[in-house]
Image (cartoon, rainbow, N blue to C red):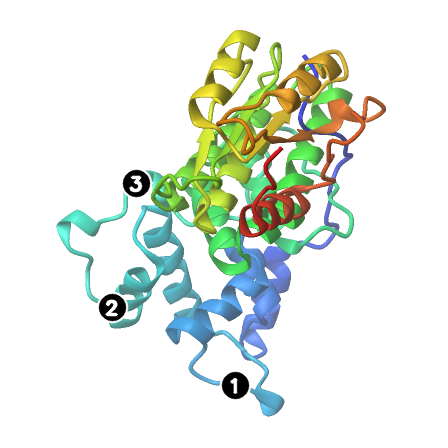
């Protein structure tokens, strides 16, 4: 089966973080980077909690540099545990700052222990992932996925989407991590397949948790999204569905391997302004299918309309259909549909 993801080696850190953290603590507190490594989150997340919720250190050095004491770190560890248990960040911060025990329905589940960095807790999958210049958040997400740590992974994915927005989180954090896991799978004689499935499932779950309510149908605004027959990689279309819904665009998402006759029937029933067809593999990308859907028309004579078909995914590379756009990524696909919805479509 062709993978959504691709390549990576091992990520190793020759420094003993326990010793470094202890030495720094004795010298007057930890830096933000050291705290983030200890918690298994990104430094930007720690700074964001300081800025948004007042979870910063009690004291700062000259130049406003943060130095975190054991008490400061304990508050952040509690914040991690509460958010990983499903509590909204603002409520989790309130409880962490107050020192009060959570209400019975807010108590964190046992599985919601704060994530620890891979160097502190030996990687049960055997090694880490080399993520190069990817965002720091990628490393935390990758470590949680390799440990099969559901609570930590949910918390990190939710925080990334909330802090950076869906498009940036998908493009700069989630996709590089998925690619790294996929490359590890390819190089490990089919080991780590469970990590890829685990990560993909939790990304999908994070999307559903953060998705707004479906937009009400509007004439000339509906977008239909589906995988071509034989294609089951739905995750990119799930992301596009949420991104368009966030912009108030009504979407009809049909998921994986939609049969041709069902796709045609769905287009006729919904009269979409755009149809996105995802193909992960060149063996599933079908020019005749895309051209057939693009030629479909409806409405009365003189004001008949037809959809704009977007050929989405790497399967269309080298199989470009003349006259049909092939967006290079999520941001471009969203921009094409938004422009189409806002500008309308001339009748044929």
* Residue displayed at 61% across by 65% down: 33
Q: Position of residue 100 (x, y in %)?
A: 20, 66
Q: Position of residue 9 (x, y in %)?
A: 78, 34
Location of mark 3 (residue) = 110
* Residue displayed at 42% across by 82% down: 58
Q: Badge 1: how crowded within 10 Å, few (<14), some, or many (20+)?
A: few
In the orientation shown, which residue stands out farthest toward the bottom? 62
Residue 139 visible, this angle: no
Asked which secondary structure carries label 1, the reply is loop
Q: Badge 3: how crowded within 10 Å, few (<14), some, or many (20+)?
A: few
User: How many marks overall?
Assistant: 3
Q: Report the disc number at residue 60.
A: 1
Q: Badge 2: how crowded within 10 Å, few (<14), some, or many (20+)?
A: few
Determine whether 214 is above or below 33 in the image.
Answer: above
Asked which secondary structure carries label 3, the reply is helix
Q: Position of residue 11 (x, y in %)?
A: 73, 42
* Residue displayed at 57% across by 44% down: 141
In the orientation shown, which residue stands out farthest toward the right? 318
In which quarter of the view is residue 345 placed?
top right
Asked which secondary structure carries label 2, the reply is loop
Q: Nearer the viewer, residue 81 or 276?
A: 276
Q: Is residue 75 left or right of residue 321?
A: left
Location of mark 2 (residue) = 99
């Amino acid at each position: 089966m062709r993978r959504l993801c691709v390549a990576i080696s091992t990520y190793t850190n020759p420094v003993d973080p326990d010793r470094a953290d202890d030495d720094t603590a004795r010298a007057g507190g930890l830096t933000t980077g050291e705290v983030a490594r200890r918690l298994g989150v990104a430094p930007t997340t720690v700074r964001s909690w300081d800025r948004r919720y007042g979870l910063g250190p009690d004291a700062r050095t000259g130049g406003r540099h943060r130095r975190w004491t054991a008490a400061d770190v304990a508050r952040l560890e509690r914040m991690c545990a509460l958010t990983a248990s499903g509590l909204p960040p603002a409520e989790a911060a309130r409880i962490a700052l107050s020192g009060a025990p959570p209400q019975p329905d807010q108590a964190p589940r046992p599985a919601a222990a704060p994530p620890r960095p891979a160097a502190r807790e030996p990687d049960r999958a055997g090694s880490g992932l080399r993520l190069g210049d990817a965002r720091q958040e990628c490393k935390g997400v990758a470590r949680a996925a390799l440990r099969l740590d559901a609570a930590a992974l949910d918390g990190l994915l939710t925080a990334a989407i909330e802090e950076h927005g869906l498009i940036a989180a998908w493009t700069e954090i989630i996709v590089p991590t998925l690619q790294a896991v996929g490359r590890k799978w390819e190089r490990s004689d089919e080991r780590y397949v469970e990590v890829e499935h685990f990560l993909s499932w939790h990304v999908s779950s994070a999307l559903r948790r953060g998705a707004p309510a479906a937009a009400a149908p509007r004439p000339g605004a509906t977008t239909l999204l589906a995988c071509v027959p034989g294609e089951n990689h739905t995750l990119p279309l799930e992301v596009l569905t949420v991104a368009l819904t966030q912009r108030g665009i009504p979407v009809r998402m049909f998921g994986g391997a939609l049969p041709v006759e069902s796709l045609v029937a769905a287009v006729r029933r919904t009269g979409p302004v755009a149809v996105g067809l995802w193909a992960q593999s060149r063996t599933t990308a079908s020019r005749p299918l895309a051209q057939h859907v693009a030629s479909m028309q409806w409405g009365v004579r003189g004001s008949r309309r037809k959809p704009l078909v977007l050929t989405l995914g790497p399967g269309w590379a080298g199989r470009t259909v003349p006259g049909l756009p092939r967006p290079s990524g999520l941001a471009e696909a969203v921009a094409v549909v938004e422009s189409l919805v806002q500008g309308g479509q001339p009748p044929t």
